[in-house]
Amino acid sequence: MSTPHKPLVILRADPHPPERIFRPDALARLHDRFTVVEPDTEEALDRALSDAFAVIGQPDLPAERLARAGELRALLNVEGNFFPNVDYDVCFRRGIHVLGCGPAYAQAVAEYALGLALDLARGISREDRAFRAGRERYVSDGNADAVLLRGADVGLIGFGNLGRSLHPLLAPFRPTLRVYDPWLPPAVLREQGLVPATLDETLARSTFVFVLATVTDDSHHLLGERELALLPDGARLVLVSRAPVVDFPALLARVAEGRLLAGIDVWPDEPVTADDPARALEGLVLSAHRAGGIPDAFLSIGDMVVDDLTLLAQGLPPARMQAAARELVGRYRNRPVT
Amino acid sequence: MSTPHKPLVILRADPHPPERIFRPDALARLHDRFTVVEPDTEEALDRALSDAFAVIGQPDLPAERLARAGELRALLNVEGNFFPNVDYDVCFRRGIHVLGCGPAYAQAVAEYALGLALDLARGISREDRAFRAGRERYVSDGNADAVLLRGADVGLIGFGNLGRSLHPLLAPFRPTLRVYDPWLPPAVLREQGLVPATLDETLARSTFVFVLATVTDDSHHLLGERELALLPDGARLVLVSRAPVVDFPALLARVAEGRLLAGIDVWPDEPVTADDPARALEGLVLSAHRAGGIPDAFLSIGDMVVDDLTLLAQGLPPARMQAAARELVGRYRNRPVT
Amino acid sequence: MSTPHKPLVILRADPHPPERIFRPDALARLHDRFTVVEPDTEEALDRALSDAFAVIGQPDLPAERLARAGELRALLNVEGNFFPNVDYDVCFRRGIHVLGCGPAYAQAVAEYALGLALDLARGISREDRAFRAGRERYVSDGNADAVLLRGADVGLIGFGNLGRSLHPLLAPFRPTLRVYDPWLPPAVLREQGLVPATLDETLARSTFVFVLATVTDDSHHLLGERELALLPDGARLVLVSRAPVVDFPALLARVAEGRLLAGIDVWPDEPVTADDPARALEGLVLSAHRAGGIPDAFLSIGDMVVDDLTLLAQGLPPARMQAAARELVGRYRNRPVT
Amino acid sequence: MSTPHKPLVILRADPHPPERIFRPDALARLHDRFTVVEPDTEEALDRALSDAFAVIGQPDLPAERLARAGELRALLNVEGNFFPNVDYDVCFRRGIHVLGCGPAYAQAVAEYALGLALDLARGISREDRAFRAGRERYVSDGNADAVLLRGADVGLIGFGNLGRSLHPLLAPFRPTLRVYDPWLPPAVLREQGLVPATLDETLARSTFVFVLATVTDDSHHLLGERELALLPDGARLVLVSRAPVVDFPALLARVAEGRLLAGIDVWPDEPVTADDPARALEGLVLSAHRAGGIPDAFLSIGDMVVDDLTLLAQGLPPARMQAAARELVGRYRNRPVT
């Protein structure tokens, strides 16, 4: 099926239409260097696998199917999460690269998270609404609770892709940055000028908290009622990673009491029901899972995929996508974004 | 009136009540080191001037009044703008320091301007409003026009206090930063990694434009209809300095056409009339002159005032407030913020 | 041999005595969490391998020996280079982590490289020698060839650990940073504000060149006579990675001609012979393989080792040492540092 | 003498020949915009003063001479220090700008100071000398006292032009930066992430000390025997400002004892005598007043002069040179550099 010189690549980009993640020049580079097949049935996929050098996408790949893919060198996930539909153990044993596109979204999420934090710090969307309603308050009258980010105590819950992208954006504000991440030794944080801290300490001492942790069995409701109660009154919380990390009723209750302001991009059930009382909470900035999925982020996925496939075909390691960690890939409990 | 060791300082902080600009410890330091009088009539002010070492505030000080103030070493303006009610020429000739508190607001304005820019980049307040109205769009559906600030072409109109405070906040986004400032030689900008540019070039090549210029006779309607038409479609404009710099009807027309998104903090007439159509424009983030006047900014004025008075009393130059430039102080056309 | 709860770790740190790479508290942590054995014969090593969770050091581990080590989860190299005495394919197939301590040296090398560059820019060691000989030249007299690093054209040959550590140290000088690294796609460099370039372009346009590449079959004499001739006259070259990357006779000839200044830390044969003419070249800063091996760097190896072993024992991926790339580990042609 | 449109500028650049401080294009700009006279006698100077808009250089300007210069708007000192040969009081009273070219040298001095610090941290020039003498020590053998700058405790004595230029170069090393500067309130330092400290605390807690203070009556022997004894053993001291700030015999004694390493660019008497024992001290990096006077620094003086004259002629304030502070200009005790 493939020519001798062009390795075979299977393209199964759904849920993305290919043009969402590939710029024209990336698609041209892909076709120039690889034989690309887009199997539209499971049988066609099975057939293509036997010669495949790589799979772009996240089709089901149990052990028996992988057994058939003797030439496979890489899986390039373009959805952003790793799901349990792949036998990752087999991949790691065979040295098949398991690559994720998380870095493609990280800058978009980081910029959005900073935008939410500045909105919460200064009441930007709240006062825009008031202005539209003819209730605007000039100069200092609407600024009673406004605070600077400069010099603030800031907590990061989780320090993976998102934290690493957010960190440089926060740096010029010279915050004290406390980080809770149980997967990282303190030295990794200290070397970057961050303060390693327990979850409780991070929450208790932070005026701004960014929730950046992914979902595992361990992080479900990591921020429960007890933990949220540790936050100082008037704190600002930004949630841009995964909803199950936070106990939503506890979070919304605290916002309703006026003790917390929160910018929320992910929700336990999406779409949110029409009568969800969150829709009317003044202390929220409401966002519909919009932090990462912007055109530029999607298109950078294709660039990364083609760059890394090109390296792999040259016998070099991938350099742009993120290698899944053998120890972690089975722990994630994310659901597909729909 | 003053003791031999404590220089006399006149405190006339209006429009601020003193407690808005002085933290308790700053006020304590002030009274500890200086004899402070708060004249409540013009006659009392006249009397106090004869021994005054410094004036905190911006009372009328024409030449004849200054003539009476033979010991005067400094005027410390706490309003943020210089008005034509002082004979600055006399001050400069006598070596009286004329100091402004602009730097106290600069960080607050810079953080706010960045917040507005990120809101415009990602539709944060627009989609919050939609969410509250039950019209939210999930993931990519509401992101069609969302853009990154990273790597963007960014223009700064004016590079004074505000520009210098905003610059480090923008730096980690690695933008191309074009600056139009006719008061600065290109080398000053280049040394900081900025690209000096004409006004037209700055506008024509920038996706994000921050209007940071103050008002003079030269900068009135600096951004008129012709200039605004240079902006690329889909540009984002942040206005946080002074309204007269921009031709508002032209600006709002362009937003209404969907060719420009704008975050506006200052308005030609404040309060804005109830029926101003700007209140209903989807492409705006509306803000009621809130960028600078936050509690932390006000309180830093008092810190600066006491720090600089202390230096002056030691025979040292001031180090925190901004010395007015002899050549510029008469050019400003700002009105008091009320 | 091991207790049920403490995984067995083999410690074979040579060429380092353990106290060089382990601070007392790191050694205490190691012994607290692991059963540590230090086999002094090959037989003892063989016996220990059967229960070993990890090996600290770089003993010979051919396939047959690895076959005996059924529990092995990680090899933690503490020498800085990967040698061909391990069957890496077996390791990768079995998911044994192959970890290197290169990051421990990177900061030390980066600081040293910057020190050499500033010395070459300003003639620090040359003029110190002149001063000691009574031939010092005051103020501008000795500065005819002195140049700033600020705003300079700087080239990096290779962008691995060393380049990533040097980059932030160079950033405040606002150089134009061209990078030649054939293992990285251009986007990786562009995202960091670097200019991807060919080798020839990097050399031809750089006033300062840092040679940071490791040795492979491809990089032997990467900088030969032809390439060195591309450098502008008066360029400064810093060599801190591996000597075989450069054609030394061509390099020294160019320095002798007065067309190049060079700081050299690594030499084709060490120790350098007593009569090597390089010892007398005025245009050199001579250094005896000292860039990385400082006490702080050695001691950070132990910290990294214990941190990563601790993570691995918790079922988490390592976070401090550098995972060897399957595609690269067999390409290195470094020799042990003695 | 001058045309109606071209203001008259007196050029008296000595000790610099004009071509040292003016690039051809700067000189062309100067002549294009101004009528330039270069009076070669005091009488010619007197005559020229009567119409002069500005003086480039530092001729004697006592009150009686200034009285003759009724049009004078600016003195542009191109030597780097302010001397007592000008009646500064008259200048300030008349609003004549008194501008210094200190900023032209600051980057050169900052880069040099960092180079000296890295040399002292790692023994670069010491080991280069050993290598040339056939006594080089490989790898760790010569590194027993080598330390990182990363994370170090660093003290700055004085935080003027030099400190502000050095600060960003040190920032990526993430040091703890203590600063002693009695002319600055603590808030100025804290806002930049620096730790304000007393002189004793700065010395006692710093591994690296940069002496950046200028000479006044107060700073003569600021670092005397008592103060130097506060430094921790093994500290590194860099002296690049003025020799009288330090008690040299005490400094050299401490270096001779092996308790201090020092990089010294300025000396109590220059040239240093041939038999000065400092020439043989192993713990020194010896430098002959070379930190600032490099070609690029000299040439930037001319750029600054022309840029600021151009602004002044447009009725704008200068933006590149440094305005002398009325309170300080009479305190300096620098001598001309010859």
Image (cartoon, coloured by chain):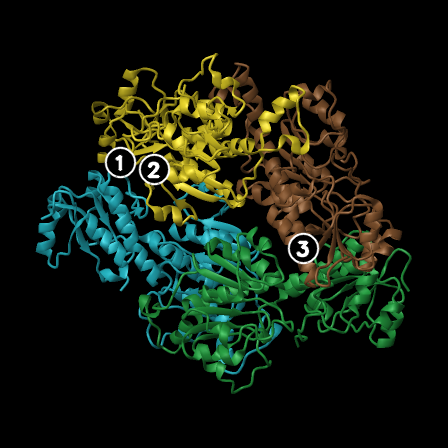
Chain colours: A yellow, B brown, C cyan, D green
Q: Which mark is residue C130?
A: none
- Percent position (x, y) of residue B214? 74, 40
Image height check: is C27 above or below B109?
below
Quadrant in the picture for residue C57: bottom left
Q: Amino acid at mark 2?
A: Leu
- Crowd tier of the residue under label 2, counting other residues whose Cα lies within 10 Å: few below 14, some 14–19, many 20 or above: some
Nearer the observer, C315 or B301: B301
**For residue B194, side relative to residue C197 (left or right):** right
**Disc 3 to disc 2, C-alpha distance:** 63 Å
**Disc 1 to disc 2, C-alpha distance:** 23 Å
Q: Residue at x 44, y 39 (%)?
A: A155
Q: Which residue is mark 3?
A: B308
Q: Amino acid at mark 1?
A: Glu
Indicate which label's residue lies in the foreground, 3 or 2.
3
**For residue C264, side relative to residue A74 (left or right):** right
Nearer the observer, B20 or C236: B20
Q: Amino acid at mark 3?
A: Asp
Question: Would residue D10 be seen by someone viewing this image from the given angle?
Answer: no
Secondary element at tag 3: helix
Indicate which label's residue lies in the foreground, 1 or 3.
3
Q: Which residue is mark 2?
A: A312
Q: Which residue is mark 1?
A: A327
- Percent position (x, y) of residue D254? 45, 77
